[in-house]
């Protein structure tokens, strides 16, 4: 029914008086969904186990500090000092199980008091939570992507170093190596390193460790690995092949005169897509022990005109070629191998969300172990956001050649804007704790959908 003009328009323009009072008002009503998720996976007790060996016994245990950091990042805050803006929020307190939140100085001291064993146990917890979700899916194939990402800082923090950083040249940084799961877009493991190391530094042991842990938890699953050219070496290629892992790795063919000669001397290229041609060969560099399948890909591209263009004349399009070489032990068609390898670009979207939504690029303290705890907290916040959507929705995709995520995930910023950042009031009608919110149909339907799927609907 069409509303009348009087029902739509308002003539009220007065600015209201402002009064600040102690009330049970919350700005984050949507946290009730994460409270249900945390309860389902018993997150608080599992975090307590990560720090059970600690001899430090403050009022706020280190497990509570980590849980606070996860919530801090879910709410969209970056700096530790920003916690003062929600320290009186009742939903945050209920989620943490506290009547009073710790001060910024307490959080900083707790990060500085972290030890190596705590970091290792927290990293193990993250891997275990990811594996529990994968076990439910029952996938026949699991794709692991490996790559590094820079954490820059302008402060002098322990373990940082000046390395390659095309965005902030000269800044000190960390350069952690990430293992991500393509099917879920979650981070499985992190290897923390200083910023002046090469991508392949300590990569072999890290990669094999991830593979062994996945196999132990998911027996029978077929593991696939994708890497860029920084990981191309006889050591890594041979180790993956010996481990029975299918892989594709980009080849820095400009370093090998033989490969350049093969490309330049090749006359017959086979087409497998409108602008893509290939040839393949079994080849090994001189220092290698075994031969592997090398795919040479040629893509037709338009060459950019660098000379001045006269607008009154016709300028013909010039075309050239871009070349790419991939080494693999897969035996499928070239089109499938190339599509699979190109799918690793989705990992960049994971890194972008980690940094822009979970503040994984922030270095909060000067201590190395404290910064590792913060990074793992950011990873945990990201993974829990994905777990929430996986727990409450069926997969929207089947397995594709590119190994795209099985879900069409909403970014944390979308969940934060549409659900978490909703005003509400905690009331006690007839003695029952109730969260009262505005009657917005979209928010109501989405929130109840999450709670129903998590089996804690009121």
Image (cartoon, grey):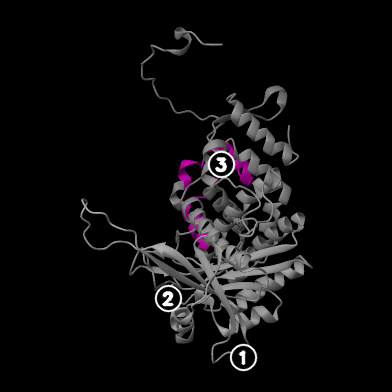
| Main secondary structure along the magenta-highlighted residues | helix
Q: In this figure, which residue is indicated by the disc labeled 1? A: 289
Which residue is the site of mark 3? 415
**Looking at the image, can residue 54 be seen?**
no
Q: Which residues are magenta?
A: 83-112
Are discs 2 and 1 less than 8 Å apart at CB?
A: no
Q: If you read the primary sequence from the N terminus, does the residue marked by circle 3 or circle 2 appear first? A: 2
Distance of label 3 from label 2 (alpha carbons): 36 Å
- Quarter of the image for residue 173 reads bottom left
Q: Are marks 3 and 2 in contact (CB under 8 Å)?
A: no
Residue nearest the viewer, comparing 252 with 362: 252
Q: Is residue 86 visible?
A: yes
| Image spot of residue 385 (x, y percent) | 61, 49
Q: Which of the two discs, 2 and 1, labels the residue nearer the N terminus?
A: 2
**Residues at marks 2 and 1, CA–CA distance in whole angstroms:** 30 Å
Identify the image quadrant of residue 282: bottom right
Front disc: 1 or 3: 1
Image: 336 above or below 82: below
Q: Residue at x 45, y 84 (%)?
A: 261
Rendered view: 266 above or below 71: below
Number of marks present in the image shown: 3
Q: Does the magenta segment cover residue 100?
A: yes
Instruction: Decide which of tag 1 and tag 3 comes sooner along the chain.
Output: 1
State the residue lying farthest toward the right: 220
Place residue 440 in its image quadrant: top right
Task: Determine which of the numbered discs, if any, sits on residue 196 in the image.
Answer: 2
Residue 182 within the segment the image draws in magenta: no
Disc 2 residue crowd, few under 14, some 14–19, many 20+, Cα 10 Å: some
Query: Where is residue 333 shown, x and y percent of the image?
Result: 65, 68
Secondary structure category for the residue under label 2: loop
Q: Nearer the viewer, residue 437 or 22?
A: 437
């Amino acid at each position: 029914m069409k509303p009348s003009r009087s029902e739509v328009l308002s003539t009220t323009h007065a600015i209201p008086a402002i009064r600040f009072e102690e009330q049970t008002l919350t700005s984050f009503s949507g946290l009730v969904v994460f409270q249900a998720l945390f309860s389902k996976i018993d997150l608080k007790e599992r975090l307590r186990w990560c720090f059970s060996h600690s001899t430090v016994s403050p009022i706020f245990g280190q497990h509570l500090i980590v849980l606070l950091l996860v919530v801090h990042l879910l709410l969209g805050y970056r700096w530790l000092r920003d916690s003062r803006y929600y320290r009186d929020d009742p939903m945050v307190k209920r989620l943490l199980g506290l009547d009073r939140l710790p001060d910024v100085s307490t959080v900083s001291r707790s990060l500085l008091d972290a030890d190596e064993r705590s970091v290792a146990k927290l990293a193990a917890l993250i891997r275990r939570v990811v594996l529990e979700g994968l076990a439910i899916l029952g996938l026949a194939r699991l794709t692991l992507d490996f790559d590094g990402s820079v954490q820059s800082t302008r402060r002098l923090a322990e373990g940082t170093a000046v390395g390659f950083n095309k965005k902030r040249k000269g800044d000190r940084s960390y350069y952690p190596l990430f293992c991500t799961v393509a099917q879920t877009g979650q981070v499985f493991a992190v290897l923390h390193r200083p910023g002046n190391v090469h991508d392949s530094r300590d990569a072999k042991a890290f990669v094999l460790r991830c593979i062994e842990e996945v196999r132990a938890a998911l027996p029978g699953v077929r593991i696939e690995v994708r890497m860029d050219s920084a990981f191309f070496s006889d050591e890594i290629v041979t180790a993956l092949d010996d481990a029975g892992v299918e892989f594709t790795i980009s080849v820095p063919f400009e370093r090998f005169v033989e490969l350049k000669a093969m490309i330049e001397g090749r006359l017959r290229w086979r087409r497998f897509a409108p602008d893509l041609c290939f040839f393949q060969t079994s080849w090994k560099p001189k220092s290698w022990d075994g031969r592997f399948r090398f795919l040479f890909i040629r893509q037709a591209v338009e060459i950019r005109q660098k000379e001045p263009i006269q607008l009154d004349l016709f300028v013909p399009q010039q075309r050239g070629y871009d070349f790419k070489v991939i080494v693999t032990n897969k035996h499928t068609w070239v089109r499938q191998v190339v599509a699979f390898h190109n799918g690793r670009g989705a990992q960049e979207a994971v890194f972008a969300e980690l940094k822009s939504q979970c503040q994984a690029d922030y270095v909060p303290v000067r201590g190395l172990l404290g910064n590792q705890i913060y990074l793992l907290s950011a990873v945990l916040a990201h993974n829990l956001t994905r777990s929430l959507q996986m727990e409450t929705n069926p997969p929207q995709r089947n397995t594709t050649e590119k190994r795209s995520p099985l879900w069409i995930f909403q970014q944390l910023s979308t969940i934060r804007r549409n659900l978490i950042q909703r005003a509400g009031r905690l009331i006690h009608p007839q003695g029952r704790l109730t969260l009262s919110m505005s009657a917005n149909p979209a928010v109501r339907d989405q929130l109840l959908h999450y709670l129903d799927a998590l089996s804690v609907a009121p």
